[in-house]
Amino acid sequence: MSGDTSFGDRVVAAGFAAGWKLVPLLPERPTAAVFRLLADRVWARHGKSVARLESNLARVTGLEPGSPELRELTRAGMRSYFRYFHEIFRLPRMSGEEIVRRTRVVGAEHIHDTVAAGRGVVLALPHMGNWDQAGAWLVNVGHPFTTVAERLKPESLFRRYVAFREGLGMEVLPLTGGDGHNFATLALRLRRGGVVCLPAERDLTKTGVEVRFFGAATKMPAGPPLLAVQTGAALLPAIVHFDGDDWGIHIQEELPVPAEGTRQEKVAALAQGLADAFEKGIAEHPEDWHMLQRLWLDDLPGGAGR
């Protein structure tokens, strides 16, 4: 473990290790209740992450900052966020049959038909619902895929997350600290008719594409639209949300690459298309959007992305 790993990081890593080991051994309903209680306690303290989620949800919904309605939506958002963690601890012990049976999918044919025609698929999704469960569904209906994961701290937690996702059937590339050839690897998978899944509403590279999102400027990753432009793969927006005790996935129609314009202009148009698709999905399920970080440029230090 590196010397700059904080005590807090080590505690979090130990908590995740215990979660993957112990939660599957305990009854589901009582442990779910514990996670809801933890979510409520974190929400009640109204720390920085909760305040940021509340601010983000105010933009999305138009609710008045500080209003009871917005506070209740934020609590529902924290419960959704903690439900995600409860479920990922249980997911490795869940059968593929159960995962598929409990997942209600709209638009699955957009993946199946494209892959059957020999084309690659880029699934782009916001941080909503349980995206790991959605990945497990995709694997279990016959489409193992490649994704990129943010390098978490400490390294032991990152390795556990990678092992968890690989155990579900995903190929995981590190966002940083790998061989530096992520784009080439993803492009190769797509040119061979494979599937790539990427989170796509928050830029982590500082080289994102500026878009309008809920009426204000933000930057989204260039990777998903650029892969579609470069490889001819179909770019499919996907919205993942909770559906009662089960899960919902809405796979939307392919965003067409513009026939005219430079590569940069085509990428920008596709990025805006993703932003528009994500807007609609998030507006329909705002409580399941787990955005606890700054997103819009005018929320960044100095404003307007400076």
Image (cartoon, rainbow, N blue to C red):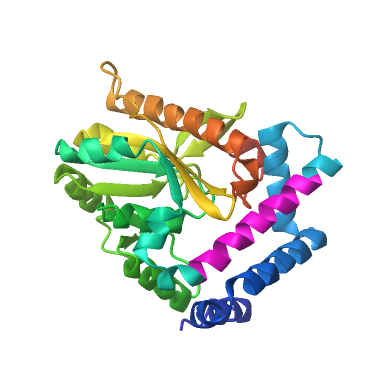
Which of 213 and 82 lies nearest the eye of the viewer?
Answer: 82
Q: Residue at x 55, y 30 (%)?
A: 280
**Among the 4 quarters of the image, the one containing residue 302:** top right
Q: Is residue 66 visible?
A: no
Residue 270 in percent (x, y) is at 38, 28
Q: Taking 202 as reference, is 259 above or below it?
A: above
**Among the 4 quarters of the image, the one containing residue 63:** top right
Asked if residue 121 lies left or right of residue 300, the reply is: left
**Among the 4 quarters of the image, the one containing residue 179:** bottom left
Which of 154 and 143 lies nearest the eye of the viewer?
Answer: 143
Which of 177 and 55 lies nearest the eye of the viewer?
Answer: 55
In the image, which residues are magenta?
71-89
Asked if residue 40 lies left or right of residue 294, the reply is: right
Q: Is residue 64 visible?
A: yes
Residue 154 in percent (x, y) is at 49, 75
**Of helix, strand and loop, which mostly describes the magenta segment?**
helix
Q: Residue 88 magenta-drawn?
A: yes
Q: Taking 221 as reference, is 10 above or below it?
A: below
Q: Taking 282 as reference, is 144 above or below it?
A: below
Q: Residue at x 69, y 68 (%)?
A: 33
Residue 258 in percent (x, y) is at 30, 20
Q: Residue 221 magenta-drawn?
A: no
Q: Residue at x 33, y 55 (%)?
A: 147
- Which residue is farthest top? 260
Residue 139 in percent (x, y) is at 30, 56
Q: Residue at x 54, y 35 (%)?
A: 281
Q: Quadrant of the C terminus?
A: top right
Q: How many marks?
A: 0
